[in-house]
């Protein structure tokens, strides 16, 4: 499949992405909260719960898997990527291996994951992946993110994208401007604009074809510790004014991450973005991990007797996101 077609298919008018690519470390922390034992088997079971949910394909166009999960199978021995394909859902894989603080710039981080990237891409493509994901995370502060951090991460995103495109894998590019901190909505807008401007400059320097990428950004929001909460119409207008300025129109699809917002907040904000979006720009949808899953995990708690109602919860959450994706919430 051509990456441009994959990006368009993911941007389906009623659907979005289920980001199920928590690392082993993140999954362990989430599971511990509910005393769920964490090993490869419980992570496999949890992902099986998500992916075998009946009707998921009505709201979800694609699933991002972790490197561990893409090799895992159902109880019946069927690869998860096959289960998803049967439903018409595309599979992809997180290719970055996480962030490390850069000495001299702490706590700011750069993202790792280029080792063996050609071999890993081919291995995951053979297992059914048609896209990949790489996240760069940015803190907002007085002089944060530093120009050097933005440049380093944007360069890494451009290099990763070239390796993906070499084998016709769609690169999902995730510049995540974090909600952590006490910054205002306006400060977030300024920093997001800077991050996205440098990103698109680097992509252009490295001659990455913008029609063959999918952008997974954060919304423009006030910091979690700012003591203020913006109403959806303010979030939407702040987000869209930045994006209209700096995101080229030939990027086919933008899929927002939830970034620690609740399902209600993330979907209300997306809904407003859809309503305000000018025609002729990008497809805009969701690529949520926490907003879609937190309540599902809380309901499951590792117990088989909660399986069915947890799947119903996932479906209900996905349906809400699908309505928001259409601006019909
Ligand atoms: P959240 O929706 O929880 O921000 O996660 C998105 C994601 O894929 C992080 O890399």
Image (tube, rainbow, N blue to C red):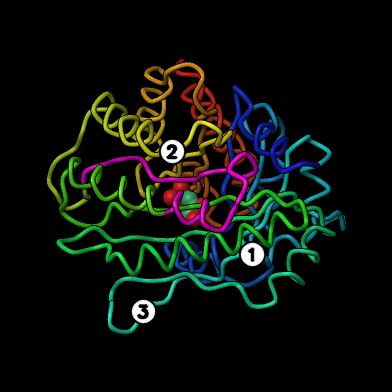
Quadrant location, the N terminus: top right
Q: Secondary structure at mark 3?
A: loop
Residue occupying image coordinates x 51% and y 38%: 255
Which of discs 2 and 3 lies nearer the camera? The answer is 2
- Which residue in the structure is indicated by mark 3? 102
- Neighbourhood count class around disc 2 (C-alpha, 10 Å): few under 14, some 14–19, many 20 upward: many
Image quadrant of residue 134? Answer: bottom right
Residue 282, horizontal then vertical, whole percent: 52, 28
- Which residue in the structure is indicated by mark 1? 42
Q: Assess whether residue 126 is covered by the magenta stretch.
A: no
Q: Assess whether residue 211 is covered by the magenta stretch.
A: yes
Cα–Cα span, label 2 and label 3: 27 Å
Residue 242, horizontal then vertical, whole percent: 32, 36
In the image, the segment drawn in magenta is 199-222
Residue occupying image coordinates x 73% and y 42%: 90
Q: Residue 247, labelled with which disc? A: 2
- Neighbourhood count class around disc 3 (C-alpha, 10 Å): few under 14, some 14–19, many 20 upward: few
Task: Name the N-terminal-most of marks 2 and 1.
Answer: 1
- Give whichever of 168, 318 is nearer the camera: 168
């Amino acid at each position: 499949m051509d990456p441009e077609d994959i990006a368009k298919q993911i941007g389906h008018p009623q659907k979005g992405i289920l980001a199920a690519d928590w690392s082993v470390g993140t999954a362990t922390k989430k599971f511990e909260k509910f005393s769920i034992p964490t090993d490869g088997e419980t992570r496999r079971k949890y992902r099986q719960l998500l992916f075998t949910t009946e009707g998921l394909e009505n709201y979800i166009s694609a699933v991002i898997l972790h490197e561990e999960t893409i090799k895992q199978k159902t109880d019946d021995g069927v690869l998860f990527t096959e289960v998803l394909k049967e439903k018409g859902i595309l599979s992809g894989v997180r290719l970055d291996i996480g962030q490390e603080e850069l000495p001299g710039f702490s706590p700011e981080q750069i993202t790792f994951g280029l080792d063996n990237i050609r071999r890993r891409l081919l291995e995951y493509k053979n297992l059914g992946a048609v896209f990949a994901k790489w996240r760069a995370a940015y803190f907002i502060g007085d002089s944060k993110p530093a120009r050097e951090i933005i440049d380093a991460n944007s360069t890494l995103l451009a290099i990763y994208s070239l390796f993906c495109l070499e084998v016709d894998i769609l690169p999902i590019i995730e510049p995540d401007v974090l909600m952590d901190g006490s910054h205002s909505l306006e400060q977030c807008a300024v920093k997001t604009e800077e991050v996205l401007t440098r990103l698109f400059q680097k992509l252009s320097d490295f001659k990455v074809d913008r029609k063959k990428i999918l952008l997974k950004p954060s919304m423009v929001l006030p910091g979690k510790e700012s003591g203020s909460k913006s109403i959806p119409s303010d979030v939407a207008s702040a987000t869209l004014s930045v994006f209209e300025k700096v995101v080229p129109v030939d990027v086919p699809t933008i899929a927002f991450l939830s970034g620690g917002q609740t399902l209600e907040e993330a979907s209300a904000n997306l809904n407003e973005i859809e309503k305000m979006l000018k025609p002729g720009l990008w497809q805009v949808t969701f690529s949520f991990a926490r907003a879609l899953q937190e309540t599902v995990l809380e309901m499951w708690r590792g117990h088989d007797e909660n399986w069915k109602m947890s799947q119903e919860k996932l479906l209900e959450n996905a349906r809400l996101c699908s309505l928001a994706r259409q601006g019909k919430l």
